[in-house]
Image: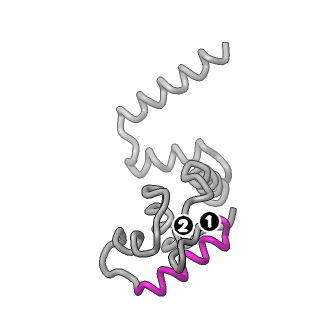
Amino acid sequence: MEELTANEEQIMRIFWKLERAIVRDILDQLPEPKPPYTTLASSVKVLEKKGYLGHKSYGKTNEYFTLIAESDYRKKSFNSLVKNFFNGSVENVLTFLVKEKKVTEKDLEELQKMIDGYENDKK
């Protein structure tokens, strides 16, 4: 699975929400300032080349659909982030989140419940 640029990720998030769309549908969902139609169409073609989208033709109109699930992309991206920025350590990720105050007390309690549940399932 090839890496996506920030622009490509933005487009894919719309496709994952809509599931099937023509370029005009994607353009309508993008925030201002919107790119030119031809620029967006080129980005969609690149996403197709990268294997993220497929299409079905209806005359001169192509309807695009996702080939890669958002959950699969999220998993790959997160694993890459952990590997590249946190030396492959989930502990380093959690430490970072706590230090940056991105984790609340409630989040920690929920995490502990998940860990406890996981440990109980293993028994």
| Nearer-the-camera pick, 113 or 69 | 69
Characterize the magenta stretch by its predominant secondary structure: helix
In this rendering, is residue 27 above or below 107? below
N-term-proximal mark, 2 vs 1: 1
Q: Which mark is residue 54?
A: 1
Residue lying at 60% horizontally and 65% vertically, measured from the top left: 53
| Nearer-the-camera pick, 88 or 20 | 20
Q: Which mark is residue 9?
A: none
Q: Please identify the quadrant where the C terminus is shown.
A: top right
- Whether 51 is among the magenta residues is yes
Kind of residue indicated by mark 2: Tyr
Residue lying at 46% horizontally and 70% vertically, measured from the top left: 22
Report the magenta residues as a range: 36-53
In this rendering, is residue 60 above or below 112? below
Q: Are marks 2 and 1 in contact (CB under 8 Å)?
A: yes
| Nearer-the-camera pick, 112 or 3 | 3
Q: Please identify the quadrant where the N terminus is shown.
A: bottom right
Q: Which mark is residue 64?
A: 2
Q: CA distance from mark 2 to mark 1?
A: 6 Å
In this rendering, is residue 19 above or below 103? below
Give the color scheme: rainbow, by chain, secondary structure or one colour.
one colour
Residue lying at 36% horizontally and 72% vertically, measured from the top left: 30
Kind of residue indicated by mark 1: Gly
Location of residue 104 in the rendering, given as x and y in whole percent from the top left corner:
36, 39
Location of residue 19 in the rendering, given as x and y in whole percent from the top left corner:
49, 56
Residue found farthest to the front = 59
